[in-house]
Structure formats: structure tokens, C-alpha cells
Amino acid sequence: MRVSVAEDAGGTARPGPIDYRSVAADPADLVTVAGTDGVYRYVSGASRRLFGWEPADLVGHQEDYFVHPHDLQGFHVARSALTTTDCVTTSYRFLCRNRSTCWTETTSRLVRVNDQDLVVSSVHDTSERHLNTSRLERQAFTDPLTGVANRPVLMDRLQRAILRLDRNDGVLAVLYLDLDRFKVVNDSLGHRVGDAVLLQMAERLLRHLRPTDTLARLGGDEFVIVAEGLPNEFEAVELGRRIIEACREPFQVAEEEFNCTVSVGIVCTRDSQRGSDDLLGEADLALYRAKDHGRDRSEIFDEDLRAKAVGRLVTEQMLRQALTEGNVVVEYQPIVDLSTGRTVAAEALVRVRDPLRGMQQPDSFMEVAEETGLLIEMDGRVLADAVAQESGWQLRLPAAHFEVAINVTARHLADSGFQKAVINQLDRHGVDPGDLQIEVTERVLLEASNSAITGLRDLRLAGVQVGLDDFGTGYSSLAYLRQFPLDFIKIDRSFLRELEAEEDGRAVVGAIIDLAHALHLTVVAEGVETEGQRRILRDLGCDRAQGFLFGASGTPEAIDRLVMAGSGVP
Ligand code: C2E
Ligand code: CA
Ligand code: CA
């Protein structure tokens, strides 16, 4: 089909008949004809629809007048290629009448009409396709919630920054950030509020960074900052301080204010031989210490921390071995009724027998056991042992009731298998659920998910007693505790120190006991070591007590002897 461009209703100039099909693959495309001087001679009516320009607005003007400045170079290269080849395709942004831009793919040919060389172009609008690819690119490189870099981008930038240490002076710092108690916000207020806090957090962080710094979110509430070219380590610590301070301001979400501080682990290096994974791992270790030292603070990585990390590995190895070789040992500490002086219960406390170093106490392995998840298996063993011992005591001891207590961690509570394991063990040994006590710490309760709390409730409905361990070492008030399903509290032994020496100490413990009783909670005092403490606690109305005064932890048989002695049975 040979048509004349002059037939186009919207057209203007008449350069003579040309093969329309050879130019525009898509009839919706814009067709233009320009001289070799680059001036438009003809513009089809599609310019109106595609770019908002009337054909008359363009004719007589230079083509490159409508090309985005960033794309000019490519545009001119394509044009000059037309002298050696008869068809080129180039991609550039067309400037629209409303000052926006449109991505195009333009195919141009050199055509000779009436002894005149003309450039005939078909301009195809590719904005949509471009938008989709840039969206895909964005998705591949950014964290969808906050729009900051994601993990692959972070690792790439960190790698490059390390290599640049070869050429540049200054210190490279990696700051590993984690929101404190973010899980509490997320669980109690919902993910929408949590997301809003994370978004505000990213905005705050960006305000404290230089354009050359990288901010990435690694998922959850973890962010990482890579800062290059700092004059010294102090500047890295200073950056950490500014960030921590910025996060102390409450976050505002839908009229409500939330406090959510941040902990920061910092590692600095000038060594271009370091690995990016190592650096991130060291910053993470430092972050761990910041959390350990009370949160809302920063710690900088040093070799001492590395030594600790090695120590952790050794402990983990010991625990794994103990689990496979049957070296997890359960000891029992007596709990006495203060009004009668009788041993009425025992708390199961775990120990690990190490062939090299002897019997290990929880403070040397508990942290590692919890971190590695091995504690779940250990607690399972303690549960089985405690319920088995309980059934033995019920057979051997004369008292109507003898109770056994076990300790449980947050992760275990959230595990639905745990409730089943408890019920199974009780069934298997024919133990009354009411004779099993489960102790959880405030931290466990605060960090527990809804499903963990439901799990506790279910166990309590089944008759198991649930108690709060180490009461007073956390931040919750008794009133706050009302929302949790509890039967007893154990007053932490730190309260007992002042019991004999100070009037105030006695008043505080007395108030705790009275309040707990008002909430129908049984009160157990922990760490009772002296006769004086025992007397005061009894006078204050405390129900039960546990401590070296009555006995340290030992074998189940040692508990038998104590109960027999207390009951008058030889
Ligand atoms: P906890 O539950 O508060 O246990 C009481 C701790 O205080 C025990 O330390 C016990 O030996 C110690 N203690 C008892 N009476 C006295 C006293 O009169 N004076 C002093 N100074 N200390 C006393 P242990 O056995 O080292 O346990 C430490 C912590 O480890 C426990 O604190 C508990 O939180 C955790 N734990 C122990 N066994 C287990 C277990 O089987 N599972 C879990 N998840 N945690 C456990
Ligand atoms: Ca306990
Ligand atoms: Ca305790």
C-alpha cells in the first residue's frame, strides 16, 4: 500500500508519497519526517494523543528540542548512524507538552524523496513497559515496606566499600540496628502499627545519614548502615549515638504515641582484605552485647567479643554432646510451706555433666542453650524427668499433695507441641495436672506471642498451675499481670537482701505479698538463706519459700528424706 503522508488528517507538511507501512509498525505510533538538518517537516496527528503537542507545535523545530537532555547523546549517535545504515532504532524520553516525559522506541530511516534526503521516523510509546521494568528493578533492589536497600544490595555495597579501602583513607563502619521490644509493639498493636513504626524508623535513620551512606533493612526490625570514609572510629560511635537519640523520640501512629528504642552494634575496619559476611557477623555480635547490656545503647566490636563467640561454640558443642550421651541431669530443690515448715514441692533445675569440666550450672550454658534452640529439647527432658519423679513421690510420700515445678522459655511456650508433651507426660505417669507447676519469667510473658499466651491458658484450663518467676526483676506491675493466666508468683531473691536490714525492704515485700493475695495469687519467696528472712516472710504472710536455708538442689531421693523428716516419718 502506497499512501501519501498528506492524507493524514492531522498532518501538516507534504513531503511527497512515502511507504507508510515501512515506517510505522503500529498505526497508533507517531510518524515524523525531518530534514537532514534535524528540523521537523511533518508530524502526524498522533503527537496530540501521545505527547499533548499539536503537530504544528513541532513542525519547524529541531527534533532534539523534544528529547530529554539525559538521552540526547544516544539520540545524536543514532541519527549519525543513519549515514552508514538505512534504519536505526533508539530509545529516548520524549518531552511532553505538560512537562512530563514519555519513554519511546523510535525507528528512523533515511528516505530520498524528490532528490531530498529525509529522516522518516516512527515513534512508539513504551512508557508502560518502562514503568513495569523499573518497578521490577525497584522490587529486586529495595525493601518493599520502607523503600531502602535490601540484603543483596547491602552485601554488594559493603563488598565494594571494603575494596575501596585500598584506595581511600578513613574508616569503614557497619552499624547493625535492632528495635528494642519491637515484637511487643507488633504483637499487641498489630502489624499495621508495626509497619508504620518501621517506616518512620527508616525515615529517621535516613535523616542522619550522608548521601553516600547505605541504609538497608534485613527484614523484621533489623536495619544495617554502611558508612564509608569516616575520619575515625569515634565518628562511627557518634553516628550510633545520634541514631539512638533520634529513636528515643516517641513514634506517632494514628494519634497514638509509642516508645520503641533501638540497640546498635558497630564494627569498624580499615582493612580491604576483610570479608563482608565477617564484618556483618561482628556487628551482629556487638549488637547482641548491646541488647545484653540493657538495650537502647550501642556497643563496638572488639576481640574480646570474638573470644566470647568462640566460647559459645564450645558450649554449644558440649550441650549437643550432653543431649546425645544422656548427660543432661535434673536436680530438685525443696519448696516449703512457711506456715507448717513442711516441704510441699520441688523445683526441677537442669544441670549438664561435662566429662572434662564436671557438673555445669545453668548460668554457664543457659544463654547458649536458648539461642541455639537446644533448650527446647533440654526442657523436654526436664519435663519428662520431673513428671516421672512426681509420680514416684506420690507413691512414696505420705502427703496428699506434692507438687513439682518446671521452668519454661518463650520459644517453648509458643510451640504447640509443648502443650501436647505436657498432657502426654501427665497421662503417661498418671499425674494430676494440678500437681505440675510451670514457671515463666516476666521476659517470657512480655515476649510471648498471642499463641503462646493461648497455650498457657489452655494448660491452665487443663489444671496445670502457672507461675511468674523472678517477680520484680522486670518492669511489669502486678496490675499489668492481671491479664495473664497466673496462679502464683515467685519473688526474686534480690528483694530478700534488704529484708532484714531495712524497714523499707520489708514494706516493699509486704506490699507485694498483699497485692498478690488480693489477686488470688500464691506467693513463693526465692533465695531464702537465713532464719531471719524466713521469720519475716512468714510474718508478712508469704505462703511458700525456697532457698539454701531449706536445701540446695539435689537428687530426688534427697527430697524424699526432707519430706519424711518434716512429716515426722523417720
Ligand atoms: P530460677 O528459676 O530462679 O531458679 C532458682 C535459682 O536460684 C537456681 O539456680 C537455684 O539453684 C538458685 N538458688 C536457690 N536457692 C538459692 C539461695 O538460697 N541463694 C542463692 N544465691 N541461690 C539460690 P540455677 O539452678 O543455677 O538456675 C538458674 C536459672 O536457670 C533458673 O533460675 C532458671 O531461670 C534457669 N533454669 C534452671 N533450670 C532450668 C530448666 O530446666 N529449664 C529452663 N528453661 N530454665 C532453667
Ligand atoms: Ca524457676
Ligand atoms: Ca527465680
Image (cartoon, rainbow, N blue to C red):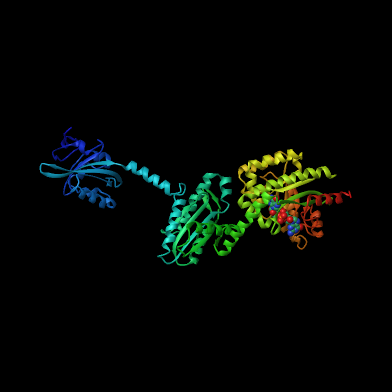
Q: Is residue 142 left or right of residue 62?
A: right
Q: Quadrant of the N terminus?
A: top left
Q: Position of residue 107 (x, y in %)?
A: 24, 43
Q: Quadrant of residue 2?
A: top left
| Nearer the observer, 387 or 75 | 387
Q: Work out whether residue 254 can be spotted.
A: no
Q: Residue 452: where, in percent of width, then height?
A: 63, 43
Q: Which residue in the rendered view is the most extreme toward the top? A: 1
| Residue 219 appears in the rendering | yes
Q: How many marks?
A: 0
The extreme left residue here reads: 115
**Residue 112 drawn at (x, y percent):** 13, 42
Estimate the x, y position of residue 119 in percent, counting from the top left. Answer: 18, 44
Q: Nearer the viewer, residue 466 or 280?
A: 280
Ligand 1 position by quadrant: bottom right
Judge left or right: residue 444 versus residue 168.
right
Q: Residue at x 63, y 54 (%)?
A: 317
Nearest the viewer among 319 and 368 is 319
Left or right: residue 458 versus residue 198 is right
| Residue at the image position 67 percent from the left and 58 percent from the top | 364
**Left or right: 291 with respect to 49?**
right
